[in-house]
Image (cartoon, rainbow, N blue to C red):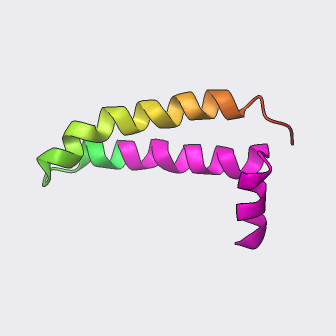
Amino acid sequence: MRTFLTGLLRLRRGPWEMLASILIALGVVMLMQPWLLIAYSYSFIVTLTGTVMFIIVSHFPE
């Protein structure tokens, strides 16, 4: 956990890509669930944020 947080603070690619992937997966889950309308409403924004974040952090150093 400590290496993950230091990787985030040092702007390393691995931890940021993992965070972006989690956001993308969370957005897809929010899109597919049938119970909460508010989660469905924000699913596109969460997925889009994760995708743009993934594109940006793919240029970070290893």
Q: Residue at x 59, y 50 (%)?
A: 19
Q: Image height check: is 10 above or below 1?
A: above
Residue 62 left/right relative to 2: right
* Residue in view at x 35 percent, y 33 percent: 45
Residue 40 locus on image (x, y percent):
21, 42
Q: Residue furthest right?
A: 62
Residue farthest along the front direction in this orientation = 9
Could you say which quadrant of the image residue 35 lies in?
bottom left
Most foreground residue, 4 or 30: 4
On the image, the x and y values in percent for residue 33 come to: 22, 50
Which image quarter: residue 58? top right
Image position, residue 24 (x, y; %): 47, 41
**Residue 43 included in the magenta stretch of the image:** no
Closer-to-camera residue (1/35): 1
Instruction: Residue at 54% x, 28% y: name it.
Output: 52
Q: Residue at x 74, y 53 (%)?
A: 9
Above or below, 18 relative to 40: below
Residue 29 relative to residue 58: left or right: left
Q: Is residue 18 magenta?
A: yes
Spot the residue most to the bottom: 1
Prevailing SS of the magenta stretch: helix
Residue range highlighted in magenta: 1-27
Q: How many marks?
A: 0
Q: Is residue 51 left or right of residue 13?
A: left
Q: Position of residue 28 (x, y in %)?
A: 37, 42
Left/right of residue 45 with respect to residue 32 in the rendered view = right
Q: Quadrant of the C terminus?
A: top right
Q: Quarter holding the N terminus? A: bottom right
